[in-house]
Image (cartoon, grey):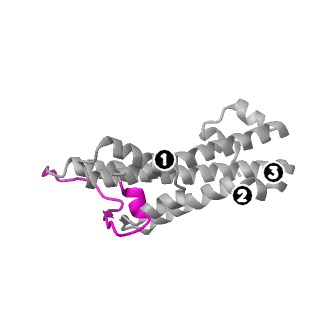
Amino acid sequence: MLSEEEFRLQGYSTNSLEMLETTEGQLNAVFACFGSAAQHGQYFEKALGEFIVKIKHVLEPATPEKHIQAAKSRLARKTIGQLLKIMGNHVQPDAQWVTDLLLKAHKSRNFLIHHYFLEREDRFKTASGRKAMLNELLNIQKQIEEATVLVDGMRFAVTERVLNRDSDSNESGTALFSIEISINETKKPCNEGLDLTT
């Protein structure tokens, strides 16, 4: 469980900490943290869809805008698992931690949305249980945020690489990992997610 000092370091005010001294305040905090973690789950989903569209658009730069918008609309109806499968068929990171982070965030987000309150019902009954829930929700949100930042970073890196593909710039710095992007139009369900023409 986070100490009072750790809560302050995360930006919580004294009023927020005092709120945690009452049952009502603890319950409100649990629901607020759940909502925040769920919100970050939606950001993760959106980042995956945007990255998939970016991959295809980079590989087919002449794609009309209306096809890009249609693909975004189709991808918005996919689950995180479906998006990860589409992405995984075309993006192979050379570092296992990248895949592990994405899968862990997916698992955490699904647990949050489908099982969290059902499996934590007994924890609502005690102050220590509610505080444990707060810590758990903060950790779930952090996992999801890290995955979202990673996916957004890959999208930005792909964009940057394409924009600078004709330059002779020597990149300085150390790469944390690399990704290989491949398009194989015979794979399914990849076509469904990557087809920008329908």
* Mark carried by residue 46: 1
The percent coordinates of residue 23 (x first, y second) are 84, 40
Which numbered disc, 3 or 1, marks the residue that appears first in the sequence?
A: 1
**What distance separates the C-alpha of mark 2 from that of mark 3?**
20 Å
The percent coordinates of residue 48 (x first, y second) are 45, 52
- Circle 1 sits in a helix, a strand or a loop, which is it? helix
Which numbered disc, 1 or 2, marks the residue that appears first in the sequence?
A: 1
User: Residue 183 magenta-drawn?
Assistant: yes
The percent coordinates of residue 77 (x first, y second) are 52, 50
Type of the residue with mark 3: Ser
Task: Give the residue at x 69% y 50%.
Answer: 135
Closer to the eye: label 3 or 1: 1
162 to the left or right of 150: left
Task: Give the residue at x 33% y 66%.
Answer: 185
185 to the left or right of 47: left
Type of the residue with mark 1: Lys
The kind of secondary structure the magenta stretch mainly shows is: loop
Q: Is residue 98 visible?
A: no
Residue marked by disc 2: 115
Task: Give the residue at x 33% y 51%.
Answer: 197
